[in-house]
C-alpha cells in the first residue's frame, strides 16, 4: 500500500507521455509539456541535492582525516572553481569564457587520458577473450581489422572508395547491430520497470 501512490503516479505520467507521442492533441501536448518541465525540475533538484551531499561527504572526510584527503581537496577545489566561474556577477553561465577555459584546461585532458587508457584495457580484454572464446573473438578481430583498413587516411580514388565502403559498413551492418541492441535493451528495460512497478519482481517480497 505504501508504494501504491508513487507507482500509480509514475504509471499515469508514463501512459500520458506515451499517448502524447502517439496522438496529436493540443490539450494533451500542453499537459505533457508541463509534466516534462516538472520532470526536468525534479531531476535538477535531485542533481543539486546529490552535489550538496557529495560536498558534505568530502568535507567531512577532510575534517575528520579519513578516506582520501588529497582527493577530497582536489574535488572541493575543482567544484569551487566551477561554481565561481559560473555564478560570478556578469557570468554567462555554462557559456562563460572562464567556464570554457576550465573545461578545456582540466576536463578535456582528463577525458583524453581516460580514453588513452581505454586502448590498453581493450587489448587486455581481447587477449582474455581469445583465451575463452577463440571463434567469436576471431570474428570480432577480423571485423575490426577490416574497419581499420577501410578507415586508413589514404588520398585519391582508393581513399574515396575506402571511405565510402567504411560509411556503408558503419551505416548498414554495424548500424543494424547497434539498433537491434538498443531495441533489445529498451524492451528489457521496459519489462523490468513494469515488473518493479507492478510488484511482480520476486525481490520485492
Image (cartoon, rainbow, N blue to C red):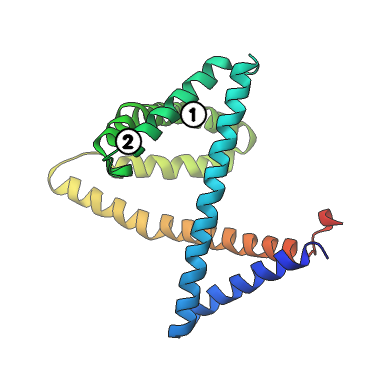
Report the mark closest to the observer, 1 or 2: 2
C-alpha span from label 1 to label 2:
45 Å
Q: Check disc 2: other Cα within 10 Å, few if <14, some if 14-19, many if 20+.
A: few
Report x, y in % for residue 132: 64, 35
* Residue at x 81%, y 62% (from the top left corner): 2
* Residue at x 53%, y 19% (from the top left corner): 71
Q: Which residue is more in the foreground, 22 or 25?
A: 25
* Residue at x 28%, y 36% (from the top left corner): 100
Q: Where is mark 1, residue-wise?
A: 123
Q: Which residue is more in the foreground, 81 or 182?
A: 81
Q: Kindly indicate the quadrant of the structure image that contains residue 64.
A: top right
* Residue at x 43%, y 28% (from the top left corner): 80
Q: Which residue is more in the foreground, 164 or 90?
A: 90
Q: Check disc 1: other Cα within 10 Å, few if <14, some if 14-19, many if 20+.
A: few
* Rendered position, 3 above or below 142: below
* Residue that sits furthest to the front in the current view: 89
Report x, y in % for residue 168: 32, 57
Q: Where is mark 2, residue-wise?
A: 88
Report x, y in % for residue 165: 28, 53
* Rendered position, 107 above or below 15: above
* Rendered position, 123 above or below 138: above
Q: Kindly indicate the quadrant of the structure image that contains residue 105.
A: top left
Please report contact status of discs 1 and 2: CB closer than 8 Å, yes or no: no
* Residue that sits furthest to the right in the current view: 205
Amino acid at each position: 500500500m505504501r508504494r501504491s501512490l508513487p507507482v500509480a503516479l509514475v504509471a499515469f505520467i508514463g501512459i500520458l507521455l506515451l499517448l502524447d507521442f502517439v496522438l496529436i492533441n493540443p490539450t494533451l501536448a500542453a499537459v505533457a509539456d508541463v509534466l516534462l518541465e516538472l520532470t526536468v525540475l525534479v531531476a535538477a533538484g535531485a542533481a543539486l541535492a546529490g552535489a550538496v551531499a557529495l560536498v558534505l561527504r568530502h568535507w567531512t572526510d577532510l575534517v575528520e582525516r579519513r578516506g582520501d584527503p588529497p582527493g577530497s581537496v582536489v574535488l572541493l577545489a575543482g567544484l569551487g572553481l566551477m561554481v565561481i566561474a559560473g555564478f560570478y556577477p556578469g557570468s554567462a553561465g555554462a557559456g562563460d569564457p572562464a567556464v570554457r577555459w576550465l573545461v578545456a584546461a582540466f576536463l578535456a585532458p582528463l577525458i583524453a587520458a581516460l580514453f588513452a587508457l581505454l586502448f590498453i584495457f581493450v587489448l587486455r580484454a581481447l587477449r582474455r577473450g581469445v583465451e575463452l572464446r577463440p571463434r567469436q573473438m576471431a570474428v570480432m578481430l577480423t571485423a575490426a581489422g577490416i574497419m581499420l583498413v577501410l578507415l586508413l587516411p589514404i588520398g585519391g580514388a582508393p581513399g574515396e572508395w575506402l571511405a565510402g565502403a567504411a560509411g556503408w559498413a558503419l551505416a548498414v551492418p554495424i548500424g543494424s547491430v547497434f539498433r537491434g541492441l538498443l531495441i533489445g535493451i529498451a524492451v528489457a528495460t521496459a519489462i523490468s520497470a513494469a515488473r518493479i512497478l507492478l510488484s511482480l519482481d520476486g525481490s520485492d517480497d
